[in-house]
Image (cartoon, rainbow, N blue to C red):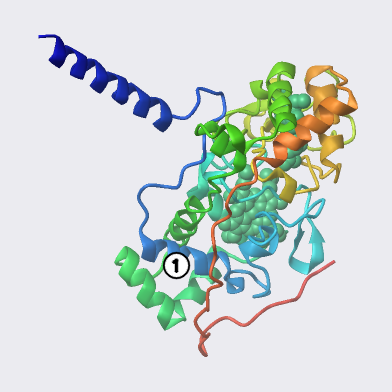
Amino acid sequence: MKVPHLILELCLLTFSFTQISAAPRAEPIQPIKRPSKVNAKEVELGKKLFFEPRLSKSAFISCNSCHNLATGGADNLKSSIGHGWQLGPINSPTVYNSSYNLAQFWDGRAKDLFEQAGGPIANPGEMAFTHKLAVKTLNSIPEYQKEFKTVYGVKTIKIKNVQKAIAAFEETLVTPNSRFDKWLNGNDKALTANELTGYENFKKFGCIGCHNGPAVGGTSYQKFGLVHPYTKDTKTMGRFAVTKNPADKYLFKVPTLRNIELTAPYFHDGDTWDLDEAVRLMAWHQLGLKPNEKEVKSIVAFLKTLTGELPKITYPILPPSTASTPKPDTSFKR
Ligand code: HEC
Ligand code: HEC
């Protein structure tokens, strides 16, 4: 009678061991996961559109101009350059891991990636085109017609198909297997002692209260200047622009800190190029703290462990224009 009992216990033991090693550590940050279901043809089409400059008035600016996938999914400028070399009002956030955001844009005015993707094409300060001309362009190109037909079964390409394909591509722009995720998944050797201290400080000081979840951000709107007001940019109102509720002034979507070392300058106004300085500013404005140099350095060392495996992107070859494709229009009234 005793033997089967022992076997049962052994089974349970092995079972619980596998459970432990398979489940990530119970932390307020979770590992980044690749999307489970993808439609490869839709993603490939979305990729073409992401790199498609003919979706802009000048036929020169694509999503990738401001969300360069080679430079952390952002443009590394204080604020973006759009049609006619116009300087935009705000820093471009990374598109990597953007599928984890509770909503899109600094003020969350687009509810998801699908809704967001329609914005820049028709934004006069960005791609400066119209949705009508964008679909006219795509419908003038037989290869696009064929691809949209295969993926969505449509004869005439509509803007919603364009948005859907771009969003599907963006869903794949995730960056798993960072050193921090390896540690989360149970590899004790993945982080150095200093990096681990940095993570402990990140939690102890309270950064984690806002920067949490798989993207280490993107889960809430928070006031920039919660403890000590941020006075360098008081024009950009954040969430208030959407809700008109005075309590929402200077609330911004908490940005992801994944791959943060690749996406300087920091903050919605691109105020600083220096990650150490960004950490000091956060500690002061959000928490009323003045961490010492060692503490700052440890947090920065931790933040650098959040750089993951960026997806390998094969540069797409775009189909040729035809006689009926609208011509580039580089005119711009100053
Ligand atoms: C001229 C530069 C420019 C172009 C072109 C551009 N974007 Fe953006 N993008 C920005 C800026 C700036 C923001 C932030 C705007 C804001 O929050 O008000 C942004 C925000 C976003 C966001 C939200 C990310 C987040 O964390 O909130 C996504 C997603 C995005 N863009 C995808 C795209 C796609 C897809 C295209 C092409 C259809 C595109 N962008 C074209 C500059 C650009
Ligand atoms: C009360 C919420 C809150 C706390 C606490 C907080 N942050 Fe932030 N963090 C934000 C918000 C909101 C922004 C965006 C501010 C802006 O640019 O408008 C941000 C931006 C950042 C950025 C710049 C990201 C980018 O892409 O531009 C870094 C880096 C950062 N935080 C690190 C930290 C660190 C380190 C701590 C702890 C010392 C911390 N944060 C504490 C809410 C918070």
Residue shown at the point (64%, 34%) measured from the top left: 242
Q: Mark 1 points at which residue?
A: 45
Q: Please identify the quarter of the rendering in which residue 213 is found.
A: top right
Rendered position, 207 above or below 149: above
User: Which corner quadrant holds the N terminus?
Assistant: top left
Rendered position, 73 above or below 25: below
**Residue 124 visible somewhere in the drawing:** no
Residue type for callout 1: Leu
**Disc 1 C-beta below 8 A from ligand 1:** no
Rendered position, 291 above or below 187: above
Q: Tell me: 137 left or right of 301.
A: left
**Residue 334 visible somewhere in the drawing:** yes
Residue 248 picture location, percent across and down: 69, 25
Residue with the most extreme bottom position: 323
Residue sitting nearer the eye, 318 or 174: 174
For label 1, the SS is helix
Residue sitting nearer the eye, 223 or 276: 276
- Ligand 2 is found in the corner quadrant, namely top right
